[in-house]
Structure formats: C-alpha cells, structure tokens
Image: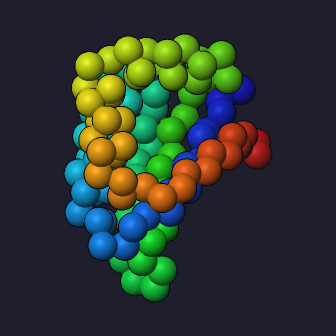
C-alpha cells in the first residue's frame, strides 16, 4: 500500500522566497533519499502563509527508512539547517494518507 505524506507548512509570509529555495532543493534531495516527491505548492492568491508538500512511499517502513537517510544526507541536513537558521517555517503538520482504489 502506497502512503503519501501531506505536509502543511505555515510560513512567515515575508520569507516566501526562502521557503521556495528550500522546497526547490527538496525536489532533488528527496528522490535521492528514496521518496517519490510529488511536489511542493506555494501561495499564489488568497492565503499568503500556507504551503504544501506531498511525498509518497511504498509503505510506512519505507518512510521511516527515508527519514533516517535524509537526516544523514549532507544536502538534506544542510537544508534542514537552512530552515532552522532562517525561521521561515512557523509550523509544520504531517498527515499520512492512502489512496482510495
């Protein structure tokens, strides 16, 4: 069963450019660490402080293995540190979904 992680980010609306750079880096880091990155979505019109990311995995076990790999990965660790230093993410929520078939 495929599991998709739906990530909802609450952003500092004045730091959208920093979040976009952060998200853009994940587009290559995530697949290298074993995730299927479905993409990241930025505010366009309306609400200016919410963004989304979707990543799929073969199973929850595959997700757990990915989390260990991405934290140990040099580029992944650097991207996490970039977010921590610049504080453009105010809150992050993860929901685990399965597709209705």
The number of numbered discs placed on residues in the rendered structure image is: 0
Residue visible at 58% across and 23% down in the picture: 63
The image quarter containing residue 1 is top right
Q: Is residue 88 above or below residue 54?
A: below
Query: Could you tell me if residue 27 is visible in this image?
Result: no
Q: Of residues 101 and 62, which is closer to you in this image?
A: 62
Q: Residue at x 55, y 51 (%)?
A: 92
The one nearer the camera, 56 or 42, is 42
Q: Is residue 91 left or right of residue 83?
A: right
**Rendered image coloring scheme:** rainbow
In this rendering, the answer to whether 76 lies above or below 20 is above
Work out whether residue 33 can be spotted.
yes
* Residue 50 percent across, percent down from the top left: 48, 67
In the rendered image, the quadrant that contains the C terminus is top right
Question: Which residue is situated farthest in the right direction here?
Answer: 100
Q: Point out residue 45 in the picture as x, y percentages from the top left corner.
A: 40, 83
Residue 11 horizontal/vertical position (percent) = 43, 64
Q: Give the residue drawn at x 36%, y 35%.
A: 80
Residue found 38% across the figure and 30% down from its top: 30
Splitting the image into 4 quarters, where does residue 60 fall? top right
For this orientation, the residue located farthest to the bottom is 46
> Please, which residue is most extreme toward the front here?
85
For the residue pair 101 and 80, the one nearer the viewer reads as 80
Q: Position of residue 82 (x, y in %)?
A: 27, 41
């Amino acid at each position: 069963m495929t599991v998709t992680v739906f990530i909802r980010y609450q952003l500092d609306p004045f730091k959208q450019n920093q979040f976009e750079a952060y998200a853009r880096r994940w587009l290559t880091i995530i697949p290298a660490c074993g995730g299927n990155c479905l993409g990241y979505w930025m505010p366009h019109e309306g609400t200016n402080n919410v963004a989304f990311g979707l990543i799929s995995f073969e199973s929850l076990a595959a997700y757990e293995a990915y989390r260990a790999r991405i934290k140990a990965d040099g580029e992944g660790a650097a991207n996490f540190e970039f977010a921590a230093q610049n504080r453009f993410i105010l809150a992050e929520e993860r929901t685990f979904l399965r597709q209705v078939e």
